[in-house]
Image: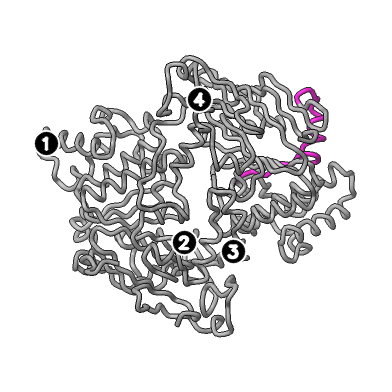
Amino acid sequence: MTQPLLSVRNLSTRFRTDRGLVRAVDDVSFDVAPGETLAIVGESGSGKSVTALSILRLIPDPPGKIESGEILFEGKDLLKLDDAGIRAIRGDRIAMIFQEPMSSLNPALTVGLQVGEPINLHRKTVWSKALDKAAELLGKVRIPDGKSRLNSYPHQYSGGMRQRVMIAMALACQPKLIIADEPTTALDVTVQAQILALLKELTREANSAMILITHDLGVVARYADRVAVMYGGRIVETAPARPLYKSPRHPYTRGLMASVPRLDGDTGRPLVPIEGQPPDLASLPAGCAFALRCKDATERCHRERPPLVESARHHFSACWYHERLAA
Amino acid sequence: MNASPPETLLAVADLKVHFPITKGIVVKRQVGTVKAVDGISFSVGRGETLGLVGESGCGKSTTGLAILRMLDITSGKVEFEGEDISAYDRGRMRPIRARMQMVYQDPYGSLNPRMKVADIVGEPLVVHGLATDKDKYRARVAELLKMVGLLPDMAERYPHEFSGGQRQRIGIARALALEPTLLICDEPVSALDVSIQAQVVNLFMELQERLGLTYIFIAHDLSVVRHISDRIAVMYLGRIVEIATRDQLYKDPLHPYTQALLAAVPIADPEIEAGRTQQIITGEIPSALRPPPGCRFHTRCPKAMDVCKTVDPPMRERDDGRAVACHLHS
């Protein structure tokens, strides 16, 4: 692999709650290469969003805290930067797109001001020029008549249009990395397809890398180059997309794939659900977090936590029996 | 389809549900109408599952609520077990409601947090005066919980002690309490995590087999609908645009909107995805307040012709039993 753009090393983020210490992200490491799309897949509570927020240091402290680790971006450790230093990165070199466009846009400011803000702030461009650029960006995300729509407010836009505005904001300073946290979950399926295709096209054009956070295995298959599967605050499997889907080497990944109905699946057979519930992050077991739901768990799985090891070239699995799964 | 079609349990004919938009506080005047459901017809056979799909605002949930008469019907006919219920008042609907029940989307919002599970599941029995014998009542609640895969001793707990999937099971147990024939399920798995969805989908299918239930399964997830449904109706802006058996619809969709919907759903396999031609339709669903003239889909349709802009295509039944509302197929 070429020199990674982002390298997350042993990241641990915890939250103090009245139920005790919650290890939302526990010793997570991964790289993102320039221009690639990495999908982080997992269910609610798997730690995927907290991982994303930790990269930009957006974890509310208290109750949250990034306890340890390194986040190396373009050679700098983002965790060592002071407040002004991280603010200079946010929205400029690394931009974020959130799930809910209505609550991430300011309802009291015009769209023009919000799309122009990062340009004005980071590029020190005068407002009149920043607004010209904002109109151009709206055109880029296919909002027709961008110039006149600069003066509209978010509520005058539909859900899909608002997400386009979010993308325009994210692209404003041509970031090297875009973190998109469930960017289309709130949208209808035809609009979801439009937005994701647009996002993919524009990131490719700008040669930006993307971390796409989602629970949808179909979206991952369509858009990701590489995949990291999270469970119980850890990465349990990571590989390029094709081998991951073709021969998953973690029982959780296998379980997920068997439990999701597919448009081209066999309708005669019942789905194979993963029995049980996702783990409680406040009281994780000593061994593998998936052991309680795993059909093939042994005594060792309950006792010792399996490390993430390279099971095949570029294909990592955190299962004691990853070799057996490969067969 | 079967050689002998099953007995019709529910028949909906030209159903319309319109909501007036009013302005003014003292003197209210109507300034518009949202035609949430605007003339739809379909039937559901006993023991069958009809999937109702479409994007937000297409009228699929309104259809469900109108069948249960939880919303007023503007016009049209709803016939349940041969009885025209479209003009029934609350009192006359009560015995009917025992036989058609609803399962809701939100397993958090649809259970009263201050009631014990036993009281939630048993409430329909109390309301319908079937809880006269205490022991029998308890036994029935325990039986219902077992039926949905919960333990009878969970009856004394409160909803917050359960996970999303378990809560949805409680909602299903409540819906089954009065031994209904028809369940209207409105997005029953979309709030659940992917690994839990399959558990609940399988439960629905098991219960159908065991109890002979009929389902109207309302959902936006086309993969889940495909898995569970015998026939599927696709809705767009208050209308059904296509209705067909599962295999017909997914193998050979006729309406351009159905085709667009299916093309938009990604398949969980990167190799298949790489080989798929991506035809993504543009635009978003127009407002139901002012639906486009002619065919409502013509503003987004890649195959729109001149006639589509002015003439509303009627629903036409074809020889193979499916029906489609499109000028290309008339």
Q: Residue at x 22, y 65 (%)?
A: B6
Q: Judging from the image, what secondary structure is the residue with disc 3 in?
A: loop
Query: At which x and y percent is residue A181?
Result: 63, 41
For the image shown, how many numbered marks are present on the structure?
Answer: 4
Q: Measure how far apart labels 2 and 4 are at the Cα level.
A: 43 Å
Q: Is A98 within the magenta? A: yes
Q: Measure how far apart labels 2 and 3 are at the Cα level.
A: 13 Å
Q: Is residue A259 left or right of residue B169?
A: right
Which quarter of the picture shows residue B308? bottom right
Which quarter of the picture shows residue A66? top right
Of callouts 1 and 3, the N-terminal one: 1
Query: At which x and y percent is residue B118?
Result: 24, 34
Of callouts 2 and 3, the N-terminal one: 2
Q: Judging from the image, what secondary structure is the residue with disc 2 in?
A: loop
Query: At which x and y percent is residue A127?
Result: 86, 51
Q: Nearer the viewer, mark 2 or mark 1?
A: 2
- Assess disc 3: are there few (<14), some (14-19) or many (≥20) residues with their C-alpha within 10 Å of its C-alpha: some
Can residue A98 be seen from the camera position used here? Answer: yes
